[in-house]
Amino acid sequence: MSSLLNDYMQMEQQLQQLQERLGQLQNDDRLKSELEFKGKLEELMKEFDKSASDVISILDPKAAASPAKAAAPAAGGRRKRKLKIYKNPNTGEVVETRGGNQKTLKAWKEEHGNDTVESWLVRVED
């Protein structure tokens, strides 16, 4: 089979998995609650002509006071990389890494391709 056909079939499978996951999320009461909260919050912000940064500065003045400080590297070194969490949809295996040299992640990228594995990114944390 050609590489293009393999890519197409893989993407088709991923699309089906994503559609199934989306369907599950749409029926999740927690998501419905969060979407309702977000909608009401946006309405309230619009009503009082406030931006997200305005709300953050009201709720957490320390965070808003020095946004440059959070982005600055730690004293004597470079800043800590973000934690990336990947989940292989074929095996269910989860990999957490702060760098691109993680053994399992590299093996997945060799087997499935970089773009495919990057699509398995579940979330990024500080």
Image (tube, rainbow, N blue to C red):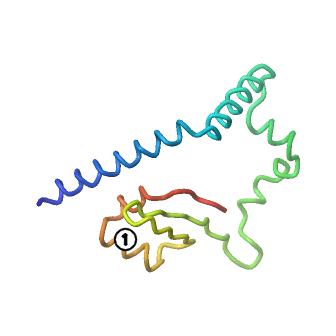
Q: Taking 64 as reference, is 47 above or below it?
A: above
Q: Nearer the viewer, residue 11 or 66?
A: 11
Q: Residue at left 66%, top 74%?
A: 78
Residue 55 image position (x, y, % from top left):
80, 36
Residue 118: percent from the left, percent from the top? 42, 60
Q: Residues within 10 Å of mark 1 (few under 14, many from 20)?
A: some
Q: Is residue 78 left or right of residue 25?
A: right
Expressed as whole percent of the image width and height from the top left, the position of residue 80 reads: 66, 71
Residue carrying label 1: 108
Residue that sits furthest to the top in the current view = 47
Q: Is residue 96 above or below residue 16?
A: below
Q: Nearer the viewer, residue 8 or 75?
A: 8
What's the amino acid at mark 1? Trp
Residue 70 lies, with reference to residue 33, above or below; the image says below
Please identify the quarter of the rendering in which residue 126 is found.
bottom right
Q: Position of residue 81 (x, y in %)?
A: 61, 69
